[in-house]
Image (spheres, rainbow, N blue to C red):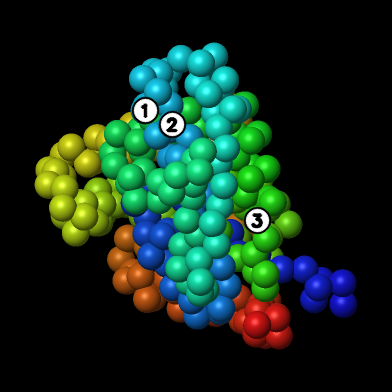
Amino acid sequence: MVAMGRPVVIAIDGPAGAGKSTVARKVAERLGLAYVDSGATYRAAALKVLEAGVSPDDAQRVAALVSGAQIEWVAPASPGVAWRVRVDGRDVTTSIRTPEVALAAAKISQLPAVRTKLVALQRQLNVGPGVVMEGRDIGTVVFPDADLKVFLDADPRERARRRRGQDAEEGRASTLEEIASQLERRDQLDAGRAISPLVPAPDAHIIDSTRLSPDQVVEKIIELARERALVERAKDKT
Ligand code: DC
C-alpha cells in the first residue's frame, strides 16, 4: 500500500535520435503524467558555458560556471507537454535545441560537478501523480527504483535519418553524413564517460525501434505499464 502513495516513475533512456522524446511525450499524455526531458538541463548548462565564451573542454571553468548557475524546471499547464527549463531566470527551452549546444552538453556532462548538480535537480521535481522522464541515466542513477525502465535503441543510420527529419522541421538543413557523424561523436561521449555512462539498467526493457513507428513503441510501453498496474495507479492519482 505504501507504493500507492508515491508518484509513478517511468524511465526512458537511450542514445540520441532513438525517438525518446516523441515516445516519452505520448506515453505521458496517455497516462496523464508529467513529461520531463532531463537532457534539457545539460543543454541549459552548456548554453550558459557557450554564452560565457568558455570552452566546454575547460573542466575547471565549466564546473565553476555550472555550480553557480541557477537552473530550474518550470511546470507546464497540462500533462504530456514538456517541462520548460530556465537558466538564471531566463527561459532557454527553445534556444538549447541546436547541434552546437548538443555537443557541448555531451562534453560537459562528463564532469562530476555537473552531473551531481543536475541529477539532484531531476530528483527534486515535484511531478504530482508521476513522470515519464527521458535521458541517459534515469533508470541507472536518477531513479534506480523506477516502476518501469525502458531502453530505447535504434540502428545508427535510422537515428541519423530521423534526426535529419527533425532538423528539417525546425528549419535546419543538414546532410545525413553530417548528422551521422555528430551522433557518432555524441554516442562515444555518452557511452564512454567514466561516470554514469549510457548503459541499459539490468532491469530495463530494451526496445529496438529501428523498424517500429513511434505509436508502435508507445503501445509496447503502455502494455508494459499495464502489466505493472501503472495505468491504474496513474489514474487513481489524477
Ligand atoms: O537528450 P539530449 O540529446 O538533449 O542530451 C544532450 C546531452 O546531455 C547528451 O549528449 C548527454 C547529456 N545527458 C546526460 O548526460 N544525462 C541525461 N540524463 C540526459 C542528457
Report the quarter where the C terminus lies: bottom right
**Quarter of the rendering containing residue 137:** top right
Q: Earlier in the sequence, mark 1 or mark 3?
A: 1
Instruction: Tell me how far mark 1 sits from mark 2, CA to CA.
Output: 5 Å
Identify which residue, 155 or 6, lies in the foreground: 6
Answer few, some or many: residues within 10 Å of disc 3's Cα (few below 14, many 20 plus, some between 14 and 19): some
Residue 131 pos. (x, y %) = 60, 65
Instruction: Tell me how far mark 1 sits from mark 3, CA to CA.
Output: 26 Å
Numbered tag placed on residue 51 in the rendering = 1
Identify which residue, 202 or 45, lies in the foreground: 45
Answer few, some or many: residues within 10 Å of disc 2's Cα (few below 14, many 20 plus, some between 14 and 19): many
> According to the image, label 2 marks what residue?
48
Q: Is residue 131 left or right of residue 48?
A: right
Report the quarter where the N terminus lies: bottom right
Query: Regarding mark 3 in the picture, which secondary structure is present there?
Result: loop
Q: How many marks?
A: 3
Q: Earlier in the sequence, mark 3 or mark 2?
A: 2
Q: Is residue 67 above or below residue 238?
A: above
Residue 157 pos. (x, y %) = 24, 49
Numbered tag placed on residue 125 in the rendering = 3
